[in-house]
């Protein structure tokens, strides 16, 4: 640590406070349905599987919580030609 | 009317056992009849912190399973005669406890004591659930640190849904004891402040226990800090917490930075002790 760090050091407590407020707002909303992301994933996949053959190994689920918007991203990889084959 | 208090936190190592011992001792020193019950079956420590580790013959599991009478398992403190301990079993695990068994023990304790302090194990599993199940009041122990605050928030949610009182729609008092608070670091913005934690958890503050060598010294010798160093800031924090639980109005003081002169800065705390 150089001597200049004393003057430029960031205060970490406000960061902790903000992170907690954001996280807990989400966690409190999810109480009782803790596996919401998993349930959504299952049900969405079930709907898609009715129409398209999908490989469960090639499904990627991402959850991103931020201040304004949260996104649930379900990325399903389909082999080429799957759409054509099953749509016919 | 006796009161059942659960001392809980979710996270381990924040000071539940220290708080159970110190708050129990402080209430007993105020003349109340107190029993502290260790629910941490398999990892008992309340006996050690109270200096009774060599006097445990029967424990909570023995009483729950009917192998011993409650009176045989209660260990009277040698320093404060209104304080008793019901130890946890060291050789069993949490599955040895049943809800009916715990209820029967708590009901019997209610007939003998003013305060039944249940020292919860860490976590949110069976042991922690049974420790809070029959409580009237909760003391949530939290450190000013992100993981502890998050876990406390989770535990508060469970207190509001999984206790008998909550299920019956009755009021359930919850209090916060903030432990290991370091006023110097909080003032510098390196540690969550008291207001930060209170705003996030939104339950009333019972006391602020400063980070202090007196707390470790007390557990080293197996004597609650309120007895071992009665003049210390930590002892005062627990004594005041006990008074507030008894309904007394005592103003909460936030620990402040101790004024240190040049001499003590140079030679450390010992030099002026």
Image (cartoon, coloured by chain):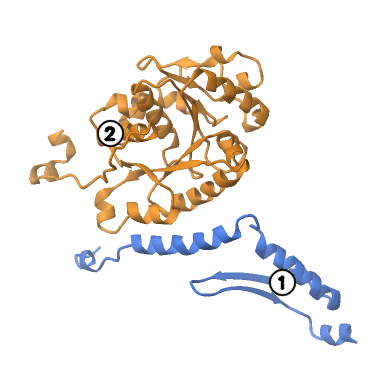
Chain colours: A blue, B orange
What element does badge 2 sit on? helix
Query: Marks 1 and 2, how far apart in space?
Result: 57 Å
| Residue A14: percent from left, percent from top | 35, 63
| Local SS, label 1 | strand
Q: Which residue is mark 1?
A: A59
Residue B184 locus on image (x, y percent): 24, 51
Question: Where residue B94 sits in the image (x, y, percent)?
Answer: 62, 32
Q: Is residue B32 visible?
A: yes
Q: Residues within 10 Å of mark 1 (few under 14, many from 20)?
A: some
- The one nearer the camera, A36 or A73, is A36
The chain identifier of the residue carrying mark 2 reads B
Chain ID, mark 1: A
The residue sitting at 79% across, 81% down in the picture is A79
What percent of the width, then of the height, locates residue B263?
Answer: 8, 42
Instruction: Tell me, for residue A85, which label it has, or none.
Output: none
Q: Do discs 1 and 2 belong to a common subunit?
A: no
- Residue B90 to residue A87: above or below: above
Label 2 packing within 10 angstroms: few (<14), some (14-19), many (20+)? some
For residue B233, which quarter of the picture? top left
Nearer-the-camera pick, A12 or B117 = B117
Nearest-to-viewer mark from 1 and 2: 2
The total of numbered circles placed on residues is 2
Residue for badge 2: B236
């Amino acid at each position: 640590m150089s001597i200049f760090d004393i003057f430029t050091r960031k205060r970490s407590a406000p960061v902790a406070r903000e992170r907690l407020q954001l996280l807990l707002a989400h966690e409190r909303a999810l109480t009782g349905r803790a596996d919401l992301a998993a349930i959504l994933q299952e049900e969405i996949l079930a709907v898609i599987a009715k129409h398209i053959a999908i490989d469960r190994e090639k499904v990627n689920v991402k959850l991103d919580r931020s201040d304004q918007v949260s996104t649930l991203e379900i990325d399903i990889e389909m082999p080429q030609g799957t759409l054509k084959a099953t749509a016919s | 009317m006796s009161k059942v208090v659960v001392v809980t936190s979710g996270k381990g190592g924040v000071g539940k056992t220290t708080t159970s011992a110190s708050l129990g001792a402080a209430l007993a020193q105020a003349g109340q009849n107190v029993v502290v019950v260790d629910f941490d079956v398999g990892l008992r420590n309340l006996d050690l912190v109270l200096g009774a580790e060599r006097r445990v013959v029967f424990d909570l599991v023995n009483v729950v399973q009917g192998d011993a009478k409650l009176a045989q398992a209660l260990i009277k403190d040698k320093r404060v005669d209104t304080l008793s301990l019901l130890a946890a079993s060291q050789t069993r695990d949490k599955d040895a406890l049943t809800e009916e068994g715990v209820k029967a023990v708590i009901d019997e304790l209610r007939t003998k004591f003013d305060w039944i302090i249940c020292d919860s194990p860490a976590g949110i599993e069976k042991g922690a659930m049974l420790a809070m199940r029959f409580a009237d009041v909760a003391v949530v122990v939290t450190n000013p640190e992100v993981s502890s605050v998050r876990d406390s928030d989770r535990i508060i949610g469970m207190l509001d849904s999984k206790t008998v009182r909550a299920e019956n729609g009755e009021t359930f008092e919850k209090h916060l004891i903030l432990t290991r608070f370091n006023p110097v670091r909080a003032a510098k913005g390196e540690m969550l402040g008291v207001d930060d934690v209170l705003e996030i958890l939104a339950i009333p503050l019972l006391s602020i226990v400063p980070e202090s060598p007196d707390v470790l010294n007390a557990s080293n010798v197996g004597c609650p800090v309120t007895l071992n160093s009665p003049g210390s800031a930590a002892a005062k924090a627990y004594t005041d917490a006990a008074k507030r639980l008894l309904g007394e109005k005592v103003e909460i003081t936030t620990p402040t930075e101790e004024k240190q002169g040049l001499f003590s800065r140079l030679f450390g705390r010992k030099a002026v002790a």
